[in-house]
Amino acid sequence: MAFSQELGAIRFGCGLSPEIAPHESARAIFRGLSQPDKMATEFPVEQTDGFLARISAYRVLNKKLDKSASAKQLEAQREAVRTMRRETAKEAGGWFAQYLLRRAHSQNPMIERLTWFWADHFTAAGKNGILISGIVPYIEAAIRPNLTGKFEDLLIAAATHPLMLHYLDQDNSVGPNSPRAQRNGGKSGLNENLAREVMELHSLGVDGPYTQSDVTELAKLLAGISIDVKKGRTFRIGMAEPGAKTVLGKTYGAQEPAIDHAIAALRDLARHHSTARNVATKLAKHFVSDTPQPSLIYALTDTFTATGGDMLAVYETLLTHPSSWDHSAPNIKQPLDLIGSALRALAIPPKSIQSLAPGKLRSLILNPMAQMGHEWGRPLGPNGLPEADETWIGPQSIAARLQWAMSAPAALMRELPDPRTFVETALGPLASPQVQFAAKAAETRWEGIGLVLACPEFQKM
Amino acid sequence: MTQSPLNRRAFLTRSAVLGCSLAASPLITPVSLAAAPWDSRLVVIILRGAMDGLDAVQPVGDPDFAALRGIARATDPLPLNSQFALHPALAPLMPLWTAGQLQLVHAVSTPYRDKRSHFDGQDLLEAGTPALGSTAGRDGWLNRLLQQMPGITAQTAYAIGMDTGAILDGDAPIARWSPDSDLALSPQALRLAELVMQTDPRFASSLSQAFFLADSDGDSLMIQGGRSEMMAAMQNDMQASRKGAAGQRIAEFTADRLLEETRIASFSINGWDTHDNQSTGIARALNSLAQTITTLKTRLGPVWDKTTVVTMTEFGRTARANGTGGTDHGTGGAMILAGGALSGAKVVSEWPGLSEAALYDRRDLMPTRDVRAHAAWVMQGLFGLDRAVLERSVFPGVEMGSDPRHIA
């Protein structure tokens, strides 16, 4: 249960690199979290503002033509819509590529790991049109700037981001006694999807002390929070529910509704002891082991509670707790971790990823990743990816990992490293005699590289 | 780690002795080829996201139904009897109804109540226990069924697709595979892959299963030639997987397995969480379910007569439409049974009614029977299992009650 540079780089970073030395101590990893976010400027992606402008333009394109429009005009419109969808999907592929490159080249790769951890904790996705391409702008705006602040600010930013409001159907939820509901005679009303997932997944956890009534009351508080393609999140008072609401025994709001009442309820949920425990457990499972030491979970919960959800302090506890360095039951890398760490070990030149045509990005990265069990931007549900290792080492996942390791590196790089050197670069002291032998015995360079990237030691973190 | 000294020559000699025929490798042939000890086939489809039973199988004869639903209900449903009608997206199943091969079970649920979490609801559905984490370990009820059957092999039961859950987890051996996964490697790379996986038994056993499955799904696992041959083989797989919808491929793969040694298969269909604009969402999901069932029927040919398909979901949805043309998480729901082994077409339900007072929690369809009881009676009919075994081991604590006579 002692720190080692390799374990630090693999467990709390994006793996070993031939170009970037691992941090020398757990403290050094921790200090890296407060450094300026160089990767965000070196590998920029679209921000939410830019993406909202696209949605705005897309809506204009989709506007119904009047009845006099000819068949030709209609076809031209359809074509313009298709083109914009295609162009946006192409650009979104580029943003994903930048995210991979950040993993490959970051000096402080724990930032990339935390970014994905929280993006998955607050799973959101677009369900139609160009919104399907919106995941990276969401992560960049709602998650990344809030990694090291208070948990409550992260919760509020993520749960009320336009993509989340869309994903969990909040944007059309209407208070049953709101002016809007009264105007159209009961045809509109509450949608409790976001309210439930905020409690069950984002904050308290499914074992938390909430009831159906708390879900409904929170849904009433959230009613009115909606999307404005010019401004992003907005509060439509005509859709909001007047009157006081009671969540977990505390009363919020007044006759005149306001977004502040919902925000106050979210803050209280974020500070709740059940939330501390839920977040602590998930962090320990994600970064350390499916079966973390209870003492680690207690320590993380205590830090969360004592600091009012100061995430930087929680990460400090995570990095400095002795059982975080226990290597007896390591996790299996998720598909994104595997691909990111492979590109890092290969020191992939940015151009070779950035210049991939959309079809190539799909066949070399996105499709294989989906076969490993992670379809980028298309989550199976708001609970995100499973943490349990069994998910990631079934036969189909192993087949997909092996096939990707054998085929993708050679397709991405003109010159592959010598497998005998690469086994040291990628695994250092963790290399088994078997993989060292395989790297030597392979008939071709690409098979040698593939075997190193597919071996069990490289799948673990 | 026990390891005899390795060198390239010794390794290649071993490979040469094993030869190039995969069937000759003990690592890649983990199962016997004996036929399963029984002939009936069972397919369990998990509908993830909570299917709205009230829209799929509409209680059109209930006086309170129309008023509750407004727009979250398909118009022009297909009448089954005076009380119930089928959602029009299930029209491809009407020929089965006519042929006596479709049954609808209504107002049922698992024992899960009140928190209405998809994920806990699905865990309980697949565990088949009265509560989570208490009575049983982490195994699923289909695996516990297998544990009761003599003479099973690793091919008897299949979990199919990328997101198969816990329903088949447990001590009895099963196979897991997604028809989209494939492997194409040189003989040397295959053997070295076996070697590197030796350091972890979980990886080693997954790999040998992957080798077996990749070799048995139509195209060869082993390729002769270099990188361009491998890339070409992968390209072929990719094209094959783009040709049909994923659901279609899963149904075809399932049928192909059932035509051979496999007797039990499970996979899931997603897309049921219709909080918003339900009419579009549920039609898509129901259509994909109907296509899946008709694909199974067509592809199974005469074996369809020995087959029962059971579809189940974690819970139903609210009796009332919500404010966004959808429905929220509820309690009681419906099951759809299909197959040539069924006893005839019928709707099975102890209908509780939809008046405010009859609803569960004044919001959801009241479940009047446990979904597990129906699944248990199906298995009793198909496999002749003892009622006591079903009530104690497969579904601990379930009351099977009177026989709904699902199976002929």
Image (spheres, coloured by chain):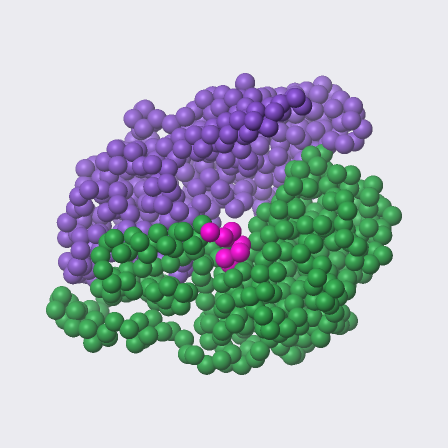
Chain colours: A purple, B green
A239 relative to A277 in the view: left or right: right
Location of residue A212 in the rendering, given as x and y in whole percent from the top left corner? 69, 42
Magenta stretch: includes residue A403:
no
Which range of residues does the magenta coloring cover? B243-250
* Vertical order, A395 against A334 (above or below): below
B144 relative to B278 in the view: left or right: left
* Vertical order, B208 against A432 (above or below): below
The image quadrant of residue A329 is: bottom left
- Residue that lies at the very extreme toward the right in this rendered image: B63
Rendered residue at 30%/33% (across/down): A354
Rendered residue at 67%/38% (across/down): B277
A175 relative to A85 in the view: left or right: right
Rendered residue at 52%/46% (across/down): A380
Nearer-the-camera pick, A275 or B287: B287
* Vertical order, B394 against A149 (above or below): below
Location of residue B54 in the rendering, given as x and y in whole percent from the top left corner? 74, 50
Report whether residue B320 is seen. Answer: no
Location of residue B269 in the rendering, given as x and y in whole percent from the top left corner? 57, 53
Location of residue A349 in the rendering, given as x and y in whole percent from the top left corner? 23, 36
Report whether residue A103 is seen. Answer: yes
Nearer-the-camera pick, B319 or B79: B79
Rendered residue at 15%/58% (across/down): A440
